[in-house]
Image (tube, rainbow, N blue to C red):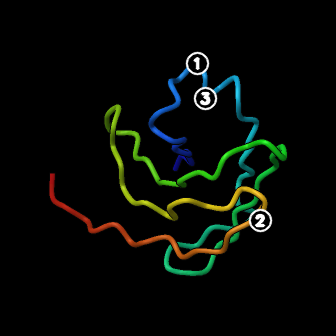
Amino acid sequence: MRFSLALPFFLGPLAASALTSINLHRPLSLVIGQPTTITWDHEATDPNFTLFLMGTTYAFDLRAVIAYDLDVSLGTITTTFPVDRVTPG
């Protein structure tokens, strides 16, 4: 499982990496269907962001949006990760 964050679309990839310093921390315990706390470090100038869950099957394998427009100054969010459906194949 990989954690990712989406920065505002109007910031290009180079500008976004130069302007932000959000560092996500791996959850201490992650149980699907149970509350999980995610924390991050940030600078005062970092923008709000969207946290989403990506799969590893292909480049844009978006599985779930965890939270939109997170207030970066919070430094933490508690959420429940969804259960993926098992599909044949």
Check residue 40 in the rendering and tell me which mark sits there, or answer none: none
| Residue position marked by numbered label 2 in the rendering | 74
Find numbered disc 2 in the image and state the secondary structure of the residue it sits on: helix
Report the residue that reaches farthest toward the left: 89
* Horizontal relation, residue 57 to residue 35: left or right: left
Classify 10 Å Cα crowding around label 3: few (below 14), some (14-19), many (20 and above). some
Q: Position of residue 34 (x, y in %)?
A: 57, 81
In the image, residue 7 sits, relative to residue 48, either above or below, namely: above
Classify 10 Å Cα crowding around label 1: few (below 14), some (14-19), many (20 and above). few
User: What is the distance, in whole Å, between disc 2 and disc 1 at their CAs?
Assistant: 25 Å
Find numbered disc 3 in the image and state the secondary structure of the residue it sits on: helix
Q: Amino acid at mark 1?
A: Leu
The answer to which quarter of the image holds residue 39 is bottom right
Which residue occupies 50% across, 70% down?
Answer: 81
| Residue position marked by numbered label 1 in the rendering | 14
Which residue occupies 27% across, 68% down?
Answer: 85
The disc, 2 or 3, on the residue closer to the chain's N-terminal end is 3
Q: Are marks 1 and 3 in contact (CB under 8 Å)?
A: yes
In the image, residue 16 sits, relative to residue 84, either above or below, namely: above
Q: Amino acid at mark 3?
A: Ala
The disc, 2 or 1, on the residue closer to the chain's N-terminal end is 1
Which residue occupies 54% across, 76% down?
Answer: 80
Which residue occupies 84% across, 47% down?
Answer: 44
Q: Are marks 2 and 3 in contact (CB under 8 Å)?
A: no
In the image, residue 35 sits, relative to residue 10, either above or below, namely: below
Check residue 16 in the rendering and tell me which mark sits there, or answer none: 3
User: What is the distance, in whole Å, between disc 1 and disc 3 at their CAs?
Assistant: 5 Å
